[in-house]
């Protein structure tokens, strides 16, 4: 049997699994069958005393039994929890496979929690794995269930609306994957198929990193406490006994850190192996430049790769960072110089072109400073018109695209919509310099309606969500920002820990650029 720390995971080999837990006082056991967004499909995915069974999941009084092969095929995970009518003390969660103990996870609530998701049993690469969660809810089972969709189901998306800068406020629940720390519960993940596999690897890496940091922090705090106790009595502070206590405290600290480091290295080695396997099988848009997919016929992809996430204090693991295609949020390459970011923009264009090979691609390129001049030649067969190099040419091109999107929206609202027949990519470089207010509004309109004409929007330039220009600020808040300066932290959506993003760059060789951009 293995003893798990928060965030650690282990493979499951049996089809029959049982979850139980021990604590002081009476508790109720339950389970939630959830999708990728960590929410149930409906109330039937909640297994408890009053609803004792769902496919593959059954309530067994002081336990929950799982038959993994019978869990509904579109479920991502089963969350196993306990709840009580009072604040929970320490909880020891146990998992059994075919009746034999497999794993144990000790949770010590510290914030008045009366409900805990102890363990997560989740699908991974055709099998099942176990993760130690320990997610607590001070609001008890009501808060836990609401968070995961029982009492407040996710509403259907509203129809697209015209984009107006004045009345809109910053989004209260951003869905960006690595923009700022967000709670671990209820995060909507943007994943599917190949993209899903990349995000599952990222999630495992994030939780393994969180376990490492938690263990290091615990070891440091315990060492500080034990060293303080060793010198707290002036009469014994400089005695051999105090020296021995300090030495023993340091040894315990070093042992804890060594075990945590070893566990993290084991996880990282496994994830590195999974990344290499995935890279060999992914479509080009999600793969590294040297992957086999770039030398074969392009295959449609549900996402594109932006770069690699890493953290120098947590080893050498580099995790591909990928987002959905068609782009559900514009990409904003943060840079003071378009020329300095030219190869980053080239990589984005190559992957966007490769992601939808079954439609003709047309690229609209705004390049006032000629910083992206090197891309114009290899992109020539894909350009929708001359590269825009004068600010007076911006408005007519944006008006043309916005009008097409408006007509597509009218057709959609009248029930006469047809799928886009081409993939349009708009690159608005040197933003916001040289752009009129009406241009910013049109970019916002294309952000909302662009999917109706198959448009992906990439903005290149300086700016933030607090520039002082209302329409620009609102547009900035709605984009997925890609920092080009090293040392800019990004945060994963599961644990809120910091990562750095090393953006992919198009290879410098002209022949390779032409091949990648025209795949």
Image: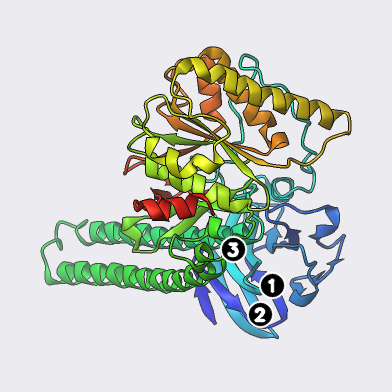
- Which residue position holds label 1? 19
> Which corner quadrant holds the C terminus?
bottom right
Q: Is residue 280 above or below residue 198?
A: below
Residue at x 80% of width, y 53% of height: 41
Q: Secondary structure at mark 3?
A: loop
Residue at x 36% of width, y 41% of height: 488
Residue at x 64% of width, y 82% of height: 13
Q: Earlier in the sequence, mark 3 or mark 2?
A: 2
State the CA–CA distance, disc 1 to disc 2. Answer: 7 Å
Q: Which mark is residue 355?
A: none
Q: Earlier in the sequence, mark 1 or mark 2?
A: 1
Q: Is residue 122 above or below residue 398?
A: below
Q: Which mark is residue 297?
A: 3
Asked if residue 409 lies left or right of residue 226, the reply is: right
- Which residue position holds label 2? 96
Q: Secondary structure at mark 2?
A: strand
Q: Secondary structure at mark 1?
A: strand
Q: Measured from the top left, where is residue 191 in percent x and y?
A: 63, 54
State the CA–CA distance, disc 3 to disc 2. Answer: 46 Å
Work out whether residue 61 or residue 320 is closer to the camera in this orientation and state it: 320
Residue at x 33% of width, y 40% of height: 485
Q: Earlier in the sequence, mark 3 or mark 1?
A: 1
**Dot 1, how many residues are within 10 Å of its Cα: few (below 14), some (14-19), or many (20+)?**
many
Q: Measured from the top left, where is residue 429 in percent x and y?
A: 45, 29
Q: Is residue 437 above or below residue 344?
A: above
Asked if residue 271 lies left or right of residue 163, the reply is: left
Work out whether residue 104 or residue 55 is closer to the camera in this orientation and state it: 55
Which label lies toward us, 3 or 2? 3
State the CA–CA distance, disc 3 to disc 1. Answer: 47 Å
Asked if residue 280 lies left or right of residue 404, the reply is: left
Marks 1 and 2 close (CB-CB < 8 Å): yes
């Amino acid at each position: 049997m293995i003893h798990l720390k928060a965030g650690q995971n282990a493979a499951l080999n049996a089809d029959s699994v049982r979850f139980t837990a021990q604590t002081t006082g009476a508790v109720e056991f339950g389970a939630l069958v959830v999708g990728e967004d960590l929410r149930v499909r409906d109330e039937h995915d909640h297994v408890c005393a009053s609803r004792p069974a769902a496919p593959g999941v059954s309530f067994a009084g002081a336990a929950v039994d799982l038959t993994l092969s019978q869990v509904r095929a579109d479920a991502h995970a089963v969350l196993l929890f306990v709840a009580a009518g009072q604040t929970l003390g320490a909880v020891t969660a146990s998992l059994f496979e075919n009746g034999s103990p497999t794993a144990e996870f000790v949770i010590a609530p510290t914030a008045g929690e009366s409900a805990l998701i102890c363990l997560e049993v989740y699908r991974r690469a055709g099998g099942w794995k176990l993760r130690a969660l320990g997610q607590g809810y001070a609001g008890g089972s009501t808060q836990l269930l609401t968070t995961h969709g029982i009492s407040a189901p996710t509403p259907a998306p509203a129809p697209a609306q015209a984009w107006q800068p004045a009345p809109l406020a910053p989004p209260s629940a951003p869905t960006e994957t690595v923009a700022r720390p967000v709670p671990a519960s209820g995060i909507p993940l943007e994943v599917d198929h190949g993209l899903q596999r990349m995000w599952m690897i990222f999630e495992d890496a994030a939780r393994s990193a969180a376990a490492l940091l938690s263990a290091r922090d615990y070891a440091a705090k315990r060492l500080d406490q034990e060293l303080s106790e060793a010198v707290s009595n002036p009469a014994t502070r400089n005695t051999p006994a105090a020296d021995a206590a300090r030495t023993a405290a340091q040894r315990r600290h070093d042992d804890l850190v060594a075990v945590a480091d070893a566990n993290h290295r084991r996880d990282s080695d496994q994830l590195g192996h999974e990344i290499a396997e995935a890279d060999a099988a992914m479509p080009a848009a999600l793969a590294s430049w040297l992957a086999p997919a770039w030398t074969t016929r392009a295959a449609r992809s549900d996402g594109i790769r932006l770069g690699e996430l890493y953290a120098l204090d947590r080893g050498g693991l580099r995790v591909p960072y990928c987002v959905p295609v068609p782009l559900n949020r514009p990409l904003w390459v943060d840079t003071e110089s378009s020329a300095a970011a030219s190869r980053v923009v080239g990589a984005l264009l190559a992957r966007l072109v490769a992601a939808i090979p079954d439609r003709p691609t047309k690229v609209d390129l705004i390049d006032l400073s000629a910083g992206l001049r090197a891309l114009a030649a290899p992109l020539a067969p894909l350009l929708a018109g001359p590269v825009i190099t004068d600010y007076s040419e911006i408005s007519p091109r944006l008006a043309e695209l916005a009008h097409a999107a408006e007509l597509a929206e009218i057709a959609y609202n009248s029930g006469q919509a047809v799928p886009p027949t081409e993939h349009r990519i708009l690159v608005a470089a040197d933003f916001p310099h040289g752009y009129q207010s009406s241009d910013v509004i049109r970019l916002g309109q294309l952000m909302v309606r662009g999917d109706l004409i198959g448009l992906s929007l990439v903005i290149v330039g300086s700016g933030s969500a607090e520039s002082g220009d209302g329409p620009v600020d609102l547009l900035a808040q709605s984009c997925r920002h890609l920092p080009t300066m090293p040392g800019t932290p990004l945060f994963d959506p599961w644990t809120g820990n910091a990562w750095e993003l090393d953006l992919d760059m198009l290879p410098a060789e002209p022949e390779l650029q032409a091949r990648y951009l025209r795949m």
